[in-house]
Amino acid sequence: MKKLIFILFIISLGMILFGLFGSSTHSEKLIGFGIVILFFIVFPIFSYYRWKDKKIEDYYLNNENLRKFKENNDL
């Protein structure tokens, strides 16, 4: 999964940079497709990969977590 994310990121970055600095007639399309790949494919896959084994309940702001936060706060 890590390699897939890295490969897609490099492809997206390459398309964006080639669109910016290359003298192609399709440079706007390359930049656009690079941005689309980055934001609609790479970021969701990366977010899923990083959050797949986490418990969402640990990040809820409920009374129990507020109490734990107040007990552990040294300020």
Image: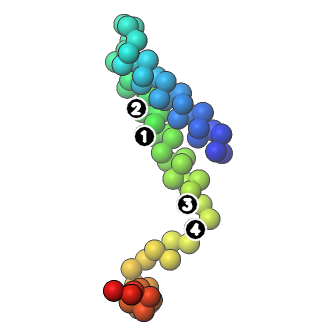
Secondary element under disc 4, as helix, strand or loop, is loop
Amino acid under label 1? Answer: Phe
Q: CA distance from mark 3 to mark 1?
A: 17 Å
Whether tag 4 and tag 3 are in contact, CB under 8 A, the answer is yes
User: Which circle's residue, 2 or 4, is located before the other in the chain?
Assistant: 2
Image height of 38 relative to 58, above or below: above
Secondary element under disc 1, as helix, strand or loop, is helix
Secondary element under disc 2, as helix, strand or loop, is helix
Amino acid under label 4? Answer: Lys
Left or right relative to 27: residue 53: right
For disc 2, the neighbor class at 10 Å (few under 14, some 14 to 19, many from 20) is some
Per the rendering, the mark at residue 53 is none
User: Which circle's residue, 3 or 1, is located before the other in the chain?
Assistant: 1
Left or right relative to 1: residue 21: left
Q: Quadrant of residue 53?
A: bottom right
Instruction: Check disc 3 and report the residue beneath it.
Output: 51
Image height of 5 relative to 63, above or below: above
For image coordinates 38% across by 15% down, the residue present is 21
User: Which circle's residue, 1 or 4, is located before the other in the chain?
Assistant: 1
For disc 3, the neighbor class at 10 Å (few under 14, some 14 to 19, many from 20) is few
- Residue 63 seen from this side: no
Amino acid under label 2? Answer: Ile
Per the rendering, the mark at residue 39 is 1
Whether tag 1 and tag 2 are in contact, CB under 8 A, the answer is yes
Amino acid under label 3? Answer: Trp
Q: CA distance from mark 1 to mark 4?
A: 22 Å
Per the rendering, the mark at residue 54 is 4
Left or right relative to 9: residue 74: left
Instruction: Check disc 2 and report the residue beneath it.
Output: 35
Question: x, y (%) of residue 18?
Answer: 44, 17
